[in-house]
């Protein structure tokens, strides 16, 4: 059990997808203007990454490994993730309109987000078991949501601040992101033994 | 080689069928959103936006063909409501509303023909045959439909007079160092 | 005394304490403004609907005669401030930051200052409470502290709410102003009589008069006047701005805070100004409606500062001509320096709510060029309602008005404490006034949109109904015609038979 807890902390903080692995930077910069949007994006990404971790594990272990088709990994992963997300989007739209209101507009945005694909590929490289890859996927997504929320909160404050014209908008956002990344490097010394 | 082609094809086919099935099984009527937008519109069908009535404008907004700011009678309040409904953010404060104008009847020229009051979408013009007409200031939306109907050009669009009750403190204008910074 | 005042002040965790500048004007004997030739009496001197004129141009009026009656539930009557002839019903610049015009009845004085026949009440304390409120309404009395809410309405609602305490606001926390101080020194007995009448009108069992500690003479005078009335008590409160805010005076005297969405009447107390109590006495015991008021003329640009009895409708220029000006004032203010209205020029009439006229010199205004917010939180400490002015202003500046409302913009008193203490000279209260007005304007457009929708629906229904009626009428006519034809046919058949 503690193994899974450590895995969760490691993937969420120590090896944060955005600030340490530099994956999923497009939604990180694009959907962090308001806390509300960031929360929706974070929830949607959490959902998709967890789902994709499960789907790709099955694909890897039931199709690619038995038939020795590892060279098709990238292609099939994208295909399966995209299709799964689309399918889920349709189901959610029909069965839970309220949930669709919060997640709906973000779901198609992240079908082939590099964070989603990256986490799936990392799981395969780690040769994780099904449960472990699920936990790792969930942890990474949690880390993504956390960082996105933090960043959005800071950008909301930044919108009220007086920023020199040359830095206003994206430039100050990048400065902020790099500082945040530096801060997350502090987790790299974390030792659980 | 063959295994790769076959498995990829099968995968594609399976996913394709699954999505196709889902598209049919879980289809949602698109009109729900449209009706909600239409309910927000004033409903006068005044035509100031350039579309065929409020339903037309609502459809155009729903298809993102028209900006949510096209409705002059709706003003900032409608833009905010639409932004909330459609889930986009808009800086309402930066929108400048054109000076709202309302119709007024020149009593010297009006002949009491009743043509204008038939077209008014809010029944804002009162009058009877051979009686001088008048515009109810509170009800007029400034759609200007009555303007062309008047045979004597007695109707003019005049800006709504600013009163003490309607006056708004202007936003502070900062100069000096702050102006450079922002 | 100083040490006690210091500790007392320490107990007040909100507000600011500006230099009060009340003396020497407060110690100068009260004077009366010589009657101006023309008086411009505005129809809207109160919160609510403007009064409706009941006189016509050219008509002779006497002092105290009703010239405009209250219109609608929230309104106040207006009376002629002197005898003379109605010159016109025209427009005059309003004492309002916009400098827009408002309608006023212009009266040409005949110099006689002749009162209309009034019936002073012999035994005013025998009047039933409703009758007192009616007479107060008929006298056109509004809150003289500056809010100008019709006094009779406030008394009637308090009577309905069964309040137990009447709080009299003699704080006069605004710097420069001393008219309430002066009135309490000059007419303490009349004020106490007015208070007892108001207690009768509301059913309150006790009355508390809150006076700031910086007015020892007024405190002494009021204590002497309340000596024989055990139910009326003078309470000394620390000198702190905005002590005169009714919620703050209430919590200071009653020891209870008021929830944000409550009024003092919800907690059993009604707050009125001491000036209003004096006006109530005048209206009921002397039969004189509210046609003049005591106001403070002050500022470094005034030659003879002091307190003046001024008829309603006198121009600011008349007042300053009497008090004398030392050079061109840098700023004219109606009311106090914290919450008063900056006047565009001197051709503005004195209204019922005018507590002071200030002609300030350039040195008094000081530098006001704003710089950046350094987040020092001085405004947070100063805010009497515990808001975060810096956060609200930053959001309003970025155009996020609803975000400012989430920070409590609705509870802002616009007292100006934050602007006063801001070391960066940021016009904080100006932002809040702008945001409040802008939100009100949006609410109005929303209402208008609703009304338009209703009208459009009503028209649609009307058109349908008319079409239906037309069709029915046509059908009926057709049926009649058919019946006639049939009858004709039958009769012709009968004829042939």
Image (cartoon, rainbow, N blue to C red):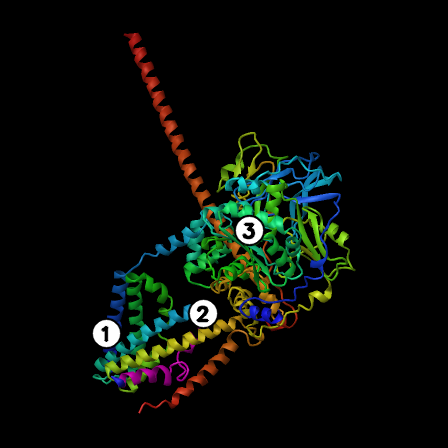
Q: Chain under label 2?
A: A
Question: Which of the two discs, 1 and 2, sits closer to the camera?
Answer: 2
Q: Chain under label 1?
A: B
Q: Which mark is residue B10?
A: 1
Bin the neighbour count of mark 1 within 10 Å (Cα to Cα): few under 14, some 14-19, many 20 and up. Answer: few
| Quadrant of the frame with the N terminus of chain C | bottom right
Q: Main secondary structure of the magenta part?
A: helix
Is residue C294 located in the magenta-colored stretch of the structure?
Answer: no
User: Is residue C44 something that shows in the picture?
Assistant: no
Write the residue at 50% across / 80% down. Answer: A175
Is residue A12 located in the magenta-colored stretch of the structure?
Answer: yes
The answer to the question of whether label 1 and label 3 lie on touching residues, with beta carbons closer than 8 A, is: no
Q: x, y (%) of residue C42?
A: 65, 45
Label 2: which residue? Answer: A34
Residue stretch in magenta: A3-30
Question: Which of the two discs, 2 and 3, sits closer to the camera?
Answer: 3
Tell me how far mark 1 sits from mark 3, CA to CA.
100 Å
Q: Give the residue at the far front of this rendering.
A: C228
Bin the neighbour count of mark 3 within 10 Å (Cα to Cα): few under 14, some 14-19, many 20 and up. Answer: some
Tell which of C318 and C285 is nearer to you: C285
* Residue A31 versus residue B101 in the image, above or below: below
Which SS class for mark 2? loop
Tell me how far mark 1 sits from mark 2, CA to CA.
43 Å
Q: Chain under label 3?
A: C
Q: x, y (%) of residue C31?
A: 73, 51
Q: x, y (%) of residue C17?
A: 61, 67
Bin the neighbour count of mark 2 within 10 Å (Cα to Cα): few under 14, some 14-19, many 20 and up. Answer: some
Label 3: which residue? Answer: C229
User: Is residue C473 something that shows in the picture?
Assistant: yes
Whether discs 1 and 3 lie on one chain: the answer is: no
């Amino acid at each position: 059990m503690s193994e899974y807890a450590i895995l969760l902390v490691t993937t969420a903080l120590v090896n944060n997808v955005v600030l340490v692995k530099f994956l999923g930077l497009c939604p990180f910069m694009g959907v962090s203007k308001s806390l509300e949007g960031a929360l929706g994006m974070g929830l949607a990404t959490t959902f998709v990454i967890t789902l994709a971790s499960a789907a790709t594990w099955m694909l890897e272990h039931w199709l690619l490994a038995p038939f020795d088709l590892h060279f098709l990994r990238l292609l099939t992963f994208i295909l399966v993730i995209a299709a799964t997300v689309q399918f889920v989007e349709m189901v959610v739209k029909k069965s839970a309109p309220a949930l669709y209101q919060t997640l709906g507009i973000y779901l198609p945005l992240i079908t082939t987000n590099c964070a989603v694909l990256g986490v799936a590929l990392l799981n395969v490289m780690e040769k994780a078991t099904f449960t472990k890859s699920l936990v790792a996927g969930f942890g990474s997504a949690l880390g993504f949501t956390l960082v996105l929320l933090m960043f959005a909160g800071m950008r909301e404050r930044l919108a009220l601040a007086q920023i020199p014209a040359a830095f206003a908008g994206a430039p100050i956002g990048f400065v902020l992101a790099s500082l945040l990344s530096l801060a997350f490097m502090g987790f790299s010394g974390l030792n659980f033994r | 080689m063959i295994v790769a082609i076959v498995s990829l094809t099968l995968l594609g086919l399976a996913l394709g069928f699954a999505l196709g099935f889902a598209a049919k099984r879980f289809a949602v009527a698109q009109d729900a959103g449209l009706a909600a937008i239409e309910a927000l519109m004033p409903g006068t069908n005044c035509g100031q936006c350039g579309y065929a009535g409020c339903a037309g404008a609502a459809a155009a907004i729903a298809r993102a063909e028209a900006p949510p700011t096209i409705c002059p009678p709706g003003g900032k309040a409608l833009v905010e409501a639409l932004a909330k409904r459609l889930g986009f953010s808009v800086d309402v404060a930066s929108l400048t509303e054109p000076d709202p104008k309302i119709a007024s009847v020149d009593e010297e020229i009006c002949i009491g023909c009743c043509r204008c009051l038939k077209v008014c979408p809010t029944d804002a013009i009162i009058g009877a045959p051979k009686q001088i007409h008048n515009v109810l200031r509170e009800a007029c939306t400034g759609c200007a439909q009555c303007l062309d109907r008047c045979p004597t050009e007695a109707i003019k669009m005049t800006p709504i007079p600013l009163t003490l009750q309607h006056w708004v403190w202007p936003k502070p204008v900062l100069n000096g160092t702050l102006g450079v910074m922002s | 005394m100083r040490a006690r005042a210091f500790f007392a002040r320490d107990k007040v965790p909100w507000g600011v304490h500006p230099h009060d500048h009340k003396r020497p004007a407060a110690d100068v004997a009260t004077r009366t403004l010589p009657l101006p030739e023309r008086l411009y009496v505005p129809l809207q001197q109160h919160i609510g609907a403007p009064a409706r004129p009941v006189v016509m141009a050219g008509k002779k009026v006497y002092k105290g005669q009703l010239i405009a009656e209250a219109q609608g539930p929230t309104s106040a009557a207006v009376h002629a401030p002197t005898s003379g002839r109605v010159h016109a019903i025209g427009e005059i610049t309003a004492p309002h930051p916009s400098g827009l015009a408002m309608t006023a009845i212009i009266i040409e004085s005949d110099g006689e200052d002749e009162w209309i026949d009034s019936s002073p009440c012999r035994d005013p304390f025998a009047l039933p409470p409703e009758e007192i409120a009616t007479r107060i309404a008929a006298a056109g009395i509004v809150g003289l502290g500056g809010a100008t809410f019709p006094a009779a309405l406030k008394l009637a609602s308090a009577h309905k709410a069964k309040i137990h305490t009447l709080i009299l606001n003699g704080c006069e926390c605004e710097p420069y102003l001393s008219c309430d101080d002066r009135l309490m020194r000059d007419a303490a007995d009349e004020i106490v009589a007015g208070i007892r009448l108001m207690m009768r009108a509301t059913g309150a069992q006790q009355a508390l008069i809150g006076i700031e500690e910086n007015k020892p003479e007024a405190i002494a005078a009021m204590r002497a006047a309340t000596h024989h009335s055990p139910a009326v008590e003078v309470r000394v409160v620390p000198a702190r701005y905005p002590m005169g805010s009714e919620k703050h005076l209430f919590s200071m005297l009653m020891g209870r805070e008021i929830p944000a969405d409550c009024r003092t009447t919800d907690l059993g107390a009604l707050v009125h100004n001491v000036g209003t109590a004096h006006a109530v006495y005048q209206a009921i015991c002397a039969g004189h409606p509210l046609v003049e008021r005591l106001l403070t003329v002050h500022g470094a640009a005034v030659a003879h500062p002091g307190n003046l009895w001024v008829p309603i409708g006198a121009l600011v220029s008349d007042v300053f001509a009497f008090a004398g000006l030392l050079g061109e004032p840098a700023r004219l203010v109606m009311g106090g320096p914290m919450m008063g209205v900056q006047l565009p020029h001197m051709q503005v009439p004195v209204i019922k709510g005018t507590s002071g006229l200030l002609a300030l010199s350039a040195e008094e205004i000081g530098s006001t060029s704003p710089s950046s917010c350094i987040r020092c939180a001085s405004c947070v400490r100063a805010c009497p309602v515990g808001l975060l002015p810096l956060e609200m202003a930053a959001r309003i500046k970025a155009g996020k008005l609803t975000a400012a409302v989430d920070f409590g913009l609705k509870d802002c008193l616009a007292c100006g404490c934050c602007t006063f203490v801001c070391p960066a000279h940021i016009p904080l209260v100006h932002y809040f006034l702008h945001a409040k007005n802008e939100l009100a304007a949006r609410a109005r457009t929303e209402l208008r949109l609703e009304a338009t929708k209703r009208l459009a629906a009503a028209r649609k229904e009307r058109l349908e109904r008319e079409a239906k009626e037309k069709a029915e009428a046509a059908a009926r006519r057709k049926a009649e015609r058919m019946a006639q034809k049939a009858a004709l046919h039958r009769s012709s058949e009968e004829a042939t038979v």
